[in-house]
């Protein structure tokens, strides 16, 4: 999955697979997480949030299951 770099003190890049609804998040430390069943609306709101890190913590991390590490989606 291709990721795009974002402006965030904690998140380096994000990618989204619209077919599987998987949000891929790469953190500045290098860890990659895949958040499952994330709706497109939430991804758009994340991208355009005033604070990507704050939105991520409150809306994505708190509400969606995840898998840590690289895997094929």
Image (tube, grey):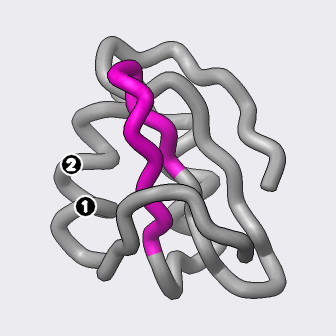
Spatial distance from mark 1 to mark 2, Cα to Cα? Answer: 5 Å
Horizontally, residue 14 falls left or right of residue 19, namely left
Tell whether label 2 touches label 1 (CB within 8 Å).
Answer: yes
Q: Secondary structure at mark 1?
A: helix
Q: Residue at x 25, y 61 (%)?
A: 61
Report the magenta residues as a range.
25-35
Horizontally, residue 30 falls left or right of residue 54, namely right
Q: How far across and how far down the image is residue 33, in percent?
A: 42, 56
Quarter of the picture containing the N terminus is: bottom right
Q: How far across and how far down the image is residue 67, in percent?
A: 39, 72
Crowd tier of the residue under label 2, counting other residues whose Cα lies within 10 Å: few below 14, some 14–19, many 20 or above: few
Q: Secondary structure at mark 2?
A: helix
Q: Residue at x 50, y 23 (%)?
A: 12
Q: Is residue 44 above or below residue 31?
A: below
Q: Is residue 53 above or below residue 6?
A: below
Q: Is residue 50 above or below residue 41?
A: above
Q: How many marks?
A: 2
As for residue 7 lying within the magenta part, the answer is: no
Q: Disc 2 marks which residue?
A: 57
Residue 62, image quadrant: bottom left
Q: Residue at x 56, y 58 (%)?
A: 70
Q: Residue at x 32, y 47 (%)?
A: 56
Quarter of the picture containing the C terminus is: bottom right
Q: How far across and how far down the image is residue 14, in percent?
A: 60, 42
Q: Disc 1 marks which residue?
A: 61
Residue 58, image quadrant: bottom left
Q: How far across and how far down the image is residue 36, in percent?
A: 48, 81
Horizontally, residue 44 falls left or right of residue 49, namely right
Residue 13, image quadrant: top right
């Amino acid at each position: 999955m291709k990721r795009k770099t974002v402006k965030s003190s904690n998140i380096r890049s994000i990618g989204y697979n619209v077919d599987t609804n998987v949000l891929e998040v790469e953190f500045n430390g290098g860890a990659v997480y895949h958040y499952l069943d994330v709706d497109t609306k939430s991804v758009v709101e994340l991208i355009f949030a005033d604070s990507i890190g704050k939105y991520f913590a409150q809306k994505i991390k708190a509400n969606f299951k995840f898998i840590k590490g690289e895997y094929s989606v």
